[in-house]
Amino acid sequence: MSPSRAIDREGEPMAEQQDHSPRIMAVIDYFRRGDAGRPDMLDGFTDDFEFFFPKFGIGRGREDFMAFAAGLVGSFKAFGHDIDGLRFIESGDNVVVEGTTRGEDKEGATWEGGTTPGGRFCSVFEFRGALIARMHIYLDPDYTSRDEARFLWGRDRRW
């Protein structure tokens, strides 16, 4: 398998990725396509795939996912995953990925996972053959930390 190429925030090629299994590469490809807003971002999914996202719930298939994506993307000016910082665990038909995102919402508030409270995530992908059949995303959807009342330990913490 040849190494993949990651693109940084300015659209410049980054260092080559390590060789990964085909399933991990399918997950990376999904993140890259989604971050670029490509219409083929779901080509690596089964037609009946299931997904979960906090505050959205469980959806099934492309139509549900596109409704979810339109709502989420519609709330952002910019959004992206730190592809080079992704960490993977693969077992059987499952790939678990931990990572960070960065972005800006429509009101101009920004976040960067690892620097701000919002932006860390963990997702579980289940495969059927070479295609993703299930994707459950676990994160705090308060990307820009507007839910002040729930910072029970204050904001002066390491993120």
Image (tube, rainbow, N blue to C red):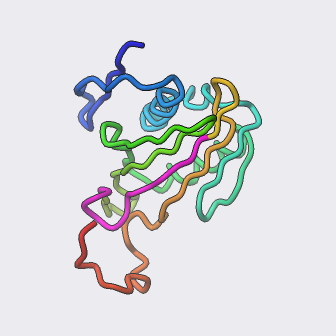
Q: Look at 33% across and 67% down and name the residue there.
A: 117
The image shows residue 122 at horizontal and vertical percentages of 48, 53
Residue 113 painted magenta: yes
Q: Residue at x 37, y 13 (%)?
A: 2
Q: Is residue 41 above or below residue 59?
A: above
Looking at the image, residue 43 sits to the left or right of residue 63; the answer is left
Residue range (magenta)? 112-125
Q: Nearer the viewer, residue 92 or 148?
A: 92
Instruction: Give the percent coordinates (x, y) of residue 54.
Output: 59, 62
Which residue occupies 43% across, 78% down?
Answer: 147
**Looking at the picture, does residue 47 appear above or below residue 51?**
above
Residue furthest front as drawn = 91
The residue depicted at 23 percent of the width and 34 percent of the height is 10
Percent across and percent down for residue 72 are: 53, 53
Image quadrant containing the C terminus: bottom left
The image shows residue 131, relative to residue 159, as above or below, that is: above
Residue that extends furthest to the top in the rendered view of this protein: 2
Q: Which quadrant of the rendered structure holds the N terminus?
A: top left
Task: Report which quarter residue 13 is drawn in.
Answer: top left
Residue 9 occupies quadrant:
top left
- Tell me where residue 69 appears, x and y as whole percent: 58, 47
Q: Is residue 114 magenta?
A: yes
Above or below, 101 against 92 in this view is below
Residue nearer the viewer, 51 or 36: 51
| Numbered circles on residues, count | 0
Left or right: 138 with respect to 154? Answer: right
